[in-house]
Image (cartoon, rainbow, N blue to C red):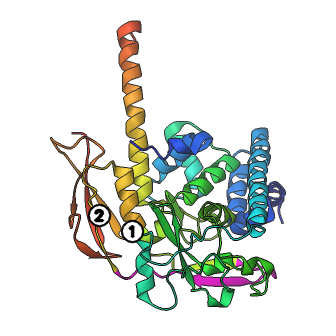
Amino acid sequence: MNTVERRARRLLRWYPRSWRETHEVEFVALLEDSIVDRPFWPGRSLNIVMSAMRVRSTEVRNLHRRMLLSSSVPLVVLVVGIGITTHGFGLLSASGPTKGGMPYNGGKGVPYNKMPDFLSVAIGLNDVGYTPKAYLAAPDGSANDPLLGRIAPIFASNLTTLLGHEYPGIGFVRLGSSPWVVSCRHENVYSETAGGGQTVTTIPCPSTTLILPNVVGMVTPSAVGELSGLGVGVVIQNVHSNSVSVGHIVSTSPEGGTRVHARQQVVVDISVPR
Amino acid sequence: MTDELSALGRYTGPATLVLSSLADGPKHGYALTKDIEHFAGVHLAPGTLYAALDRLVDHGLIEGLEPVGRRRPYKITALGATALMAHLQAQRRVTETGLGRLSGAWGAP
């Protein structure tokens, strides 16, 4: 190992193990480039220590929440069946036995082996999504883990925290921020098991149909968020409009109310300045 | 207008720089810092850069691609592009107002 790599690896060690596992290779490469570029930069080490501490403090917070979560008595079941509270991902239940909504069972836990591979999840009326059940499994994959027996009753807000942070960027798909669903490219997701092994989860794209909502007049981020949350591919087109103010949606093709395939492309015209 | 970038708090600045840099194509970490240095004159330290990347990925505004060698390129998503556009348009109003008033009251160009 050369001096530069040794320096880079020493800096990397400030980060917690879970972070290193996902970022190690690319981050060490960046640090090496940075060290070669600017060998004397005291602010760099300080910056890394501070950033790493922030990651660690977030992890501690999440662990704390997770412990609260696993010890809680049955709460409200927010992992729901299709069509009860959701419009978009509710459709998943129609697309096969390996994915779909969780049946409501009166707030009792659902055994791991009875869960569908994918869980529909609702947070309120507007935030819907789905998550592979692998992300709810115990680290050792055991179905007898005490945590698993209590998995079904989950506060959706905790679920977001649990999955969104513990597995950054993967896991629970929040309405309006779903890069997977928009592009439908992320098919395999890798996660580490406690034994150092790797599990692979395949995430299928939604495959049924839905009624396109009318987003004309909405501001761009909300409209694109709503459409991508439903699973359709959004193609943005800039247009000039006399009647629709800048940043708002002028029209979509196909238009709202049309039945489309969940993965269909929808062209969205956005009003931009002349 | 919803401004997703401003919601990132202390990461708004780095996130805006990262999204602006990715707007013309995917780049890995080092290419990002060099590009940002070039167009903004800001040298993002590695810790700050990765904190911003983590958050942008979390929010679905960028996504990591398959690594090329040891370096993983990141790509802006459609959502990221619209969020950046909304943020920059809001910033432009501030910039134009500030410059306009400066030139009126202080005779700046």
Q: Residues within 10 Å of mark 2 (few under 14, many from 20)?
A: some
Element under label 1? helix
Q: Position of residue A117 (x, y in %)?
A: 57, 85
Residue A264 in the magenta stretch? The answer is no
Q: Quadrant of the C terminus of chain A?
A: top left
Q: Nearer the viewer, residue A75 or A271?
A: A75
From this viewpoint, is residue B14 visible?
no
Q: Is residue B64 left or right of residue A249?
A: right
Q: Which residue of the protein is positioned furthest toward the left in this rendering?
A: A242
Q: Nearer the viewer, residue A3 or B50?
A: B50
Provide the chain ID for the residue under circle 2.
A
Compared with B101, B31 (above or below) is: below
Q: Position of residue B23 (x, y in %)?
A: 43, 53
Residue displayed at 79% across by 56% down: A60
Q: Amino acid at mark 1?
A: Leu
Q: Amino acid at mark 2?
A: Pro
Residue annotated with mark 1? A230
Residue A199 in the magenta stretch? The answer is yes
Residue displayed at 65% across by 60% down: A161
Cα distance, mark 2 to mark 1?
9 Å
Q: Position of residue A211 (x, y in %)?
A: 28, 71
Q: Earlier in the sequence, mark 2 or mark 1?
A: 2
Residue displayed at 73% across by 80% down: A148
Which residues, given as a range, are shown in magenta? A192-208
Residue annotated with mark 2? A213
